Image: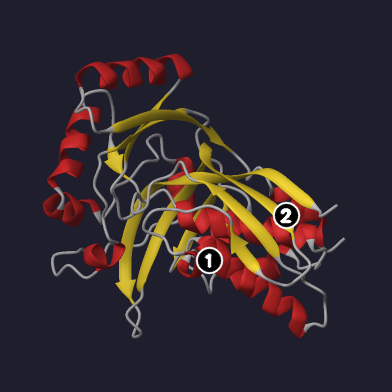
Amino acid sequence: MAATLNNCPAPAKLNLFLHVTGRRPDGYHLLQTVFQLLDHGDTLHFTVRPDGAMRRTNDIPGVPEGADLVVRAARLLQQAARERSIDAPGADITVEKRLPMGGGLGGGSSDAATTLLALNHLWQTGFSRAELMQLGVRLGADVPFFLFGQNAFAEGIGEALVPVRTPGCWYVVIEPGVTAPTAAIFSAPDLTRDTKPVRITDFSEASNCFEKNDLQVVATRLFPEIAQAIAWLGRYGDARMTGSGACVFCAFASEREASEIVSAARATAPAHWKVWQARAIERHPLSHLADTAAS
């Protein structure tokens, strides 16, 4: 019977703040942010196949199989293993999508990271967490964070990570029904690119540790529905956009408070919005796979 690993979480992330502090000569923007993991996300299932092929077993609208970060991650790990003369057979991968594309929640990056963690375990290829992170950055700047395995203060293009303690709270997230292309946000002429850098202690010691998102001004200009969602959720707290959008979030002290806001949204917010609540978590649910990979 083929080896399987089912019900593998690919959690969402929030950017509790996001500053653009500069731009590299190659065009990549320099960032500072704090990544927060949530107990809400996609779910992936893996089955080893002996013929070396990588197959996604289900359709995902708008994402061809060959372009899917999940398939690309699997092939990248397979190639890296074979370069070390390690057997890496193949896999069938099923992706249950809950996270939107272009939402700023890291859905595709999280799926890729879960794929690397799961197949490294199933294939017994033995790559360490650091080695998986080196592979992950080739797939996208957010992938190393999900492999890092815990909430983090991030700098550079998002790959320089330091563990950070974050508030143990609940979040309400609004998906306003639009997709915010990352390239359009970062290429906007009115994007702030010179925010003064902060220190990790500035975040850790602040009584209000949530700072601004430099991308929000551009995103709300280009996509008025993001501004509408921020205004609606802002009636209940300090609402802001995550990543390059389009999702909006606000923190609450308890599950009960978050549930009340979700109920209010269902009664009064636009019907096409998706509104949900999620608990902040400290570690990636599959982080233990990387802890034991090279032992």
Residue indicated by mark 1: 160
- 20 with respect to 142 (left or right): left
Q: Secondary structure at mark 2?
A: strand
Instruction: Residue 8: give x, y in percent of width and height.
Output: 65, 45
Crowd around label 2: few <14 · some 14–19 · many ≥20 (10 Å): some
Image quadrant holding the C terminus, namely: bottom right
Q: Quadrant of residue 33?
A: bottom left
Q: Secondary structure at mark 1?
A: strand
Which label number is shown at residue 213?
none
Instruction: Residue 7: give x, y in percent of width and height.
Output: 66, 41
- 212 with respect to 47 (left or right): left
Between discs 2 and 1, the one toward the N terminus: 2
Q: Nearer the viewer, residue 44 or 190?
A: 44
Q: Is residue 264 above or below residue 78?
A: above
Q: Amino acid at mark 1?
A: Ala
Q: Residue at x 42, y 28 (%)?
A: 277
- 256 with respect to 245 (left or right): right
Q: Nearer the viewer, residue 42 or 211?
A: 42
Which label number is shown at residue 47?
2
Q: Amino acid at mark 2?
A: Thr
Q: Residue at x 60, y 39 (%)?
A: 282
Q: Residue at x 63, y 58 (%)?
A: 115
Q: Closer to the camera: disc 2 or disc 1?
A: 2
Instruction: Residue 234: give x, y in percent of width and height.
Output: 23, 30
Q: Nearer the viewer, residue 27 or 180?
A: 180
Q: Are marks 2 and 1 in contact (CB under 8 Å)?
A: no
Q: Nearer the viewer, residue 29 or 136?
A: 136
Instruction: Residue 36: give x, y in percent of width and height.
Output: 49, 44
- 86 with respect to 93 (left or right): right
